[in-house]
Amino acid sequence: MSVSRVALVTGGAYGIGRGIVEEFVRHGERAVIADRDRTRGIELESSLRAEGHELLFVETDVRDEAQVRAAIDRAGEVFGRIDVLVNNAGIERYRRPEEYTADDWSAITDTNLRAAFLCAKYAYPLLRESRGTIVNIASVQAIANEPQISVYAATKGGLLALTRGMALDFAADGIRVNAVCPGAIRTGMMEPFIKDEPDPEEAVREIGRRIPLGRVGEPADIARVVWFLSSPEAAYITGASIVVDGGLLTRLAT
């Protein structure tokens, strides 16, 4: 009888990360929620366990190397393996380039880029054993940009380069590494766009009307692609960047 896989998802308690955790357990897999939000992490762990799923919450600030290593060690202790690493944790701050502070730079780069390197570094021995997969959550901002988001965009562009480099270096170990580039997805990162609107729901619909498929994406739209990339059905895909944006990048400005 095959043993269910274990997926470790950073930023797994909310938004896209939560959707990814829910997708994996829906398929009968086990999940490790690595997130710094203890309240949300425990709530998700409890609710999914109540449904009969097997998972673990580990409070983790991915900017802290010791905490990253401890989370991966804990996953190994509890489940004995890691088959899928999803580097999802991320933050963004909207500023003009000259307005960013050095602290802004450190917070964004440490969360979005350095953390993916650290997680891959420490998960590598377990991923090598399982001949597992890494999926990095990048962004359409790695390819084309809005104003006032240069530092976030730089980290996501760097994440695509890191994906390609790790795919090459880990191929001989049987570890595949890919990236997903979400477009406009309904998560907390959309809050800056709608918080001051008189009708936030209409504001979300208006954003959706600018997207060729006519709607804002949901975390499940990303989660299904992450699941595919981690599955045997994607066995010949590595070093790839998959855009999941409802067609947003296909359209010239109008």
Image: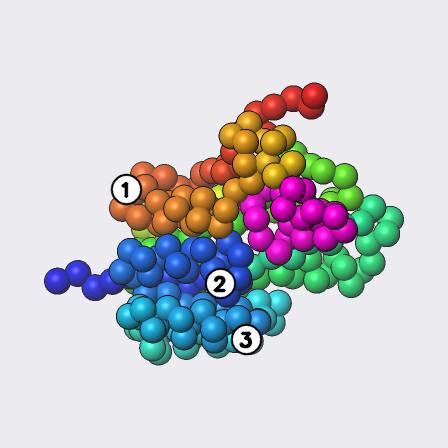
The CA distance from mark 1 to mark 3 is 35 Å
- Residue appearing at x 49%, y 50% in the figure: 219
Residue 11 lies, in percent from the top left, at: 53, 62
Closer to the camera in the image, 148 or 102: 148
In the rendered image, residue 126 lying in the magenta stretch gets the answer no
Relative placement, left or right, of 196 versus 53 is right
Element at badge 2? loop
Q: Residue at x 41, y 60 (%)?
A: 21
Tell which tag, 3 or 2, sits nearer the viewer.
3
Q: What range of the chain is rendered magenta?
A: 183-204
- Return the residue at label 2: 12
Dot 1 crowding, Cα within 10 Å, few <14, some 14–19, many 20+: few
Q: Which residue is mark 3?
A: 39
Vertical position of residue 126 compared to residue 230: above or below = below
Q: Quadrant of residue 130?
A: bottom left
Q: Which sits earlier in the primary sequence, circle 3 or circle 2? A: 2
Name the one closer to the observer, 164 or 1.
1
Q: Which mark is residue 20?
A: none
Please name the amino acid that badge 3 sits on.
Thr
Instruction: State the image coordinates of residue 112 (x, y, percent, origin top left).
Output: 61, 56
